[in-house]
Image (cartoon, rainbow, N blue to C red):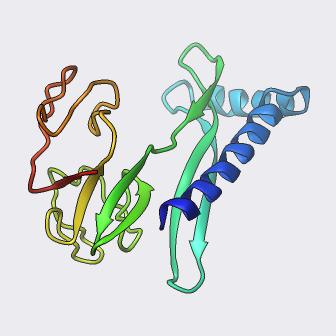
Protein backbone atom coordinates (compact mmCIF):
# COMPACT_ATOMS: atom_id res chain seq x y z
CA UNK A 1 0.00 0.00 0.00
CA UNK A 2 1.45 3.39 -0.86
CA UNK A 3 2.38 5.61 2.11
CA UNK A 4 -0.33 8.25 1.59
CA UNK A 5 -3.04 5.60 1.31
CA UNK A 6 -1.76 3.80 4.40
CA UNK A 7 -1.71 7.06 6.38
CA UNK A 8 -5.34 7.86 5.44
CA UNK A 9 -6.44 4.38 6.49
CA UNK A 10 -4.32 4.41 9.65
CA UNK A 11 -5.85 7.76 10.69
CA UNK A 12 -9.31 6.20 10.42
CA UNK A 13 -8.19 3.09 12.33
CA UNK A 14 -7.07 5.41 15.14
CA UNK A 15 -10.59 6.88 15.23
CA UNK A 16 -12.10 3.38 15.40
CA UNK A 17 -9.69 2.49 18.24
CA UNK A 18 -10.72 5.61 20.17
CA UNK A 19 -14.41 4.77 19.71
CA UNK A 20 -13.89 1.17 20.85
CA UNK A 21 -11.88 2.40 23.84
CA UNK A 22 -14.70 4.77 24.82
CA UNK A 23 -17.25 1.99 24.46
CA UNK A 24 -15.27 -0.56 26.46
CA UNK A 25 -14.66 1.99 29.23
CA UNK A 26 -18.33 3.00 29.38
CA UNK A 27 -21.05 1.87 31.75
CA UNK A 28 -22.75 0.16 28.79
CA UNK A 29 -19.88 -2.36 28.61
CA UNK A 30 -20.21 -3.47 32.25
CA UNK A 31 -22.65 -6.36 31.54
CA UNK A 32 -20.29 -7.60 28.82
CA UNK A 33 -17.30 -7.45 31.18
CA UNK A 34 -19.27 -9.26 33.89
CA UNK A 35 -20.26 -11.99 31.43
CA UNK A 36 -16.61 -12.36 30.41
CA UNK A 37 -15.53 -12.63 34.06
CA UNK A 38 -18.27 -15.23 34.66
CA UNK A 39 -17.04 -17.17 31.62
CA UNK A 40 -13.52 -17.12 33.02
CA UNK A 41 -14.70 -18.25 36.45
CA UNK A 42 -16.74 -21.12 34.95
CA UNK A 43 -13.53 -22.66 33.59
CA UNK A 44 -12.11 -23.20 37.05
CA UNK A 45 -9.30 -20.75 36.29
CA UNK A 46 -7.69 -23.30 34.00
CA UNK A 47 -8.79 -21.35 30.93
CA UNK A 48 -8.36 -17.67 30.24
CA UNK A 49 -11.05 -15.63 28.55
CA UNK A 50 -10.87 -12.61 26.30
CA UNK A 51 -13.04 -10.67 23.90
CA UNK A 52 -11.23 -9.25 20.87
CA UNK A 53 -12.32 -6.77 18.26
CA UNK A 54 -10.34 -6.99 15.03
CA UNK A 55 -10.21 -4.08 12.61
CA UNK A 56 -9.21 -5.33 9.17
CA UNK A 57 -9.30 -4.08 5.62
CA UNK A 58 -9.91 -6.12 2.50
CA UNK A 59 -8.76 -5.23 -1.01
CA UNK A 60 -11.67 -6.29 -3.24
CA UNK A 61 -9.58 -6.10 -6.42
CA UNK A 62 -6.53 -8.02 -5.19
CA UNK A 63 -8.69 -10.27 -2.98
CA UNK A 64 -6.46 -9.93 0.07
CA UNK A 65 -6.95 -8.72 3.60
CA UNK A 66 -4.88 -7.35 6.44
CA UNK A 67 -5.61 -6.87 10.15
CA UNK A 68 -4.65 -3.40 11.33
CA UNK A 69 -5.78 -3.49 14.96
CA UNK A 70 -6.80 -6.05 17.56
CA UNK A 71 -8.19 -4.72 20.81
CA UNK A 72 -10.52 -5.89 23.52
CA UNK A 73 -10.72 -7.03 27.11
CA UNK A 74 -9.37 -10.02 29.00
CA UNK A 75 -9.60 -11.50 32.48
CA UNK A 76 -6.51 -11.79 34.69
CA UNK A 77 -5.74 -14.72 37.01
CA UNK A 78 -7.10 -12.57 39.84
CA UNK A 79 -10.40 -12.29 37.94
CA UNK A 80 -9.88 -8.63 37.06
CA UNK A 81 -10.83 -7.24 33.66
CA UNK A 82 -8.04 -5.54 31.69
CA UNK A 83 -7.74 -3.94 28.24
CA UNK A 84 -5.82 -5.71 25.49
CA UNK A 85 -4.10 -4.20 22.47
CA UNK A 86 -2.46 -6.04 19.61
CA UNK A 87 -1.77 -3.64 16.79
CA UNK A 88 1.43 -3.92 14.76
CA UNK A 89 3.64 -0.97 14.02
CA UNK A 90 3.76 0.14 10.39
CA UNK A 91 6.99 -0.41 8.48
CA UNK A 92 8.09 1.27 5.25
CA UNK A 93 9.58 -0.91 2.51
CA UNK A 94 10.93 -0.66 -1.00
CA UNK A 95 8.96 -3.37 -2.76
CA UNK A 96 9.77 -4.10 -6.39
CA UNK A 97 11.16 -0.55 -6.66
CA UNK A 98 8.22 1.28 -5.03
CA UNK A 99 7.68 2.58 -1.50
CA UNK A 100 5.06 0.52 0.32
CA UNK A 101 3.78 0.57 3.90
CA UNK A 102 2.37 -2.40 5.80
CA UNK A 103 2.20 -3.54 9.42
CA UNK A 104 5.57 -5.12 10.27
CA UNK A 105 4.08 -8.62 10.45
CA UNK A 106 2.66 -8.56 6.89
CA UNK A 107 4.23 -8.85 3.46
CA UNK A 108 4.14 -5.46 1.74
CA UNK A 109 3.80 -7.21 -1.61
CA UNK A 110 0.89 -9.64 -1.07
CA UNK A 111 -0.38 -8.79 2.46
CA UNK A 112 0.20 -12.37 3.60
CA UNK A 113 1.30 -12.82 7.20
CA UNK A 114 5.10 -12.59 7.31
CA UNK A 115 6.65 -11.81 10.67
CA UNK A 116 10.36 -11.81 11.49
CA UNK A 117 11.32 -11.02 7.89
CA UNK A 118 14.98 -10.61 8.77
CA UNK A 119 15.16 -14.18 10.10
CA UNK A 120 12.65 -15.80 7.70
CA UNK A 121 13.62 -14.05 4.50
CA UNK A 122 11.02 -15.45 2.11
CA UNK A 123 7.28 -14.78 2.19
CA UNK A 124 5.55 -18.16 2.15
CA UNK A 125 2.53 -16.65 0.38
CA UNK A 126 4.06 -14.93 -2.66
CA UNK A 127 7.74 -15.90 -2.60
CA UNK A 128 9.02 -12.34 -2.11
CA UNK A 129 12.58 -12.43 -0.78
CA UNK A 130 14.07 -9.87 1.61
CA UNK A 131 16.98 -8.13 -0.06
CA UNK A 132 15.75 -9.07 -3.52
CA UNK A 133 12.08 -8.05 -3.90
CA UNK A 134 11.61 -6.33 -0.54
CA UNK A 135 13.96 -4.11 1.47
CA UNK A 136 13.38 -2.22 4.69
CA UNK A 137 13.20 1.52 4.04
CA UNK A 138 15.02 3.14 6.93
CA UNK A 139 14.26 6.84 6.69
CA UNK A 140 14.63 7.64 10.37
CA UNK A 141 17.12 6.75 13.09
CA UNK A 142 14.62 4.51 14.96
CA UNK A 143 15.68 0.87 15.28
CA UNK A 144 13.23 -1.31 13.28
CA UNK A 145 13.74 -4.16 15.74
CA UNK A 146 13.08 -2.61 19.17
CA UNK A 147 11.70 0.80 18.12
CA UNK A 148 13.51 2.36 21.11
CA UNK A 149 17.14 2.56 20.07
CA UNK A 150 18.95 4.56 17.41
CA UNK A 151 20.65 3.39 14.21
CA UNK A 152 22.16 5.08 11.17
CA UNK A 153 23.87 4.14 7.92
CA UNK A 154 27.23 4.92 9.51
CA UNK A 155 26.32 3.12 12.76
CA UNK A 156 23.89 0.31 11.83
CA UNK A 157 24.01 -1.39 15.25
CA UNK A 158 21.21 -0.36 17.65
CA UNK A 159 22.44 1.41 20.76
CA UNK A 160 19.65 -0.19 22.85
CA UNK A 161 19.06 -3.79 21.74
CA UNK A 162 22.22 -4.55 19.75
CA UNK A 163 20.30 -5.39 16.54
CA UNK A 164 22.45 -4.76 13.48
CA UNK A 165 20.93 -3.84 10.12
CA UNK A 166 22.15 -6.04 7.27
CA UNK A 167 22.89 -3.59 4.42
CA UNK A 168 21.73 -6.20 1.88
CA UNK A 169 18.23 -6.09 3.41
CA UNK A 170 17.75 -2.35 3.88
CA UNK A 171 17.78 0.93 2.01
CA UNK A 172 18.61 4.16 3.83
CA UNK A 173 16.43 7.04 2.70
Which residue is situated farthest in the right direction here? 28
Could you tell me how many numbered marks the image carries?
0
In the image, 84 versus 43, the foreground residue is: 84
Q: Is residue 73 left or right of residue 76?
A: right
Residue in the foreground of this view, choosing between 154 and 25: 154
Residue 122 image offset from top left, x and y in percent: 18, 66
Residue 172 in the image, given as x and y percentages of width and height: 23, 49
Residue 123 as seen in the image, left or right of residue 11? left
| Residue at horizontal 52 percent and vertical 82 percent from the top | 63
Above or below 91: residue 162: above
**What residue do we see at 32% from left, 45% from top?**
139
Residue at 24% in and 71% down:
124
Q: Where's residue 154, x and y in %? A: 11, 35
Left or right: where 78 falls relative to 120: right
Seen from the viewer's position, the closer of residues 123 and 171 is: 171
Up/down of 81 relative to 103, above or below: above
Query: Is residue 20 left or right of 5 when viewed as pictured?
Result: right
Amino acid sequence: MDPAEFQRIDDEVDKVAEAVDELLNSEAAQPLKKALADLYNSGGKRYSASLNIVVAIFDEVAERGMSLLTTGVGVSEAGEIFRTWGDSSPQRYITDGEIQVAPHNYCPRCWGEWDFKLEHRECRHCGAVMGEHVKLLLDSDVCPHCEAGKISASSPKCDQCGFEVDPKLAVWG
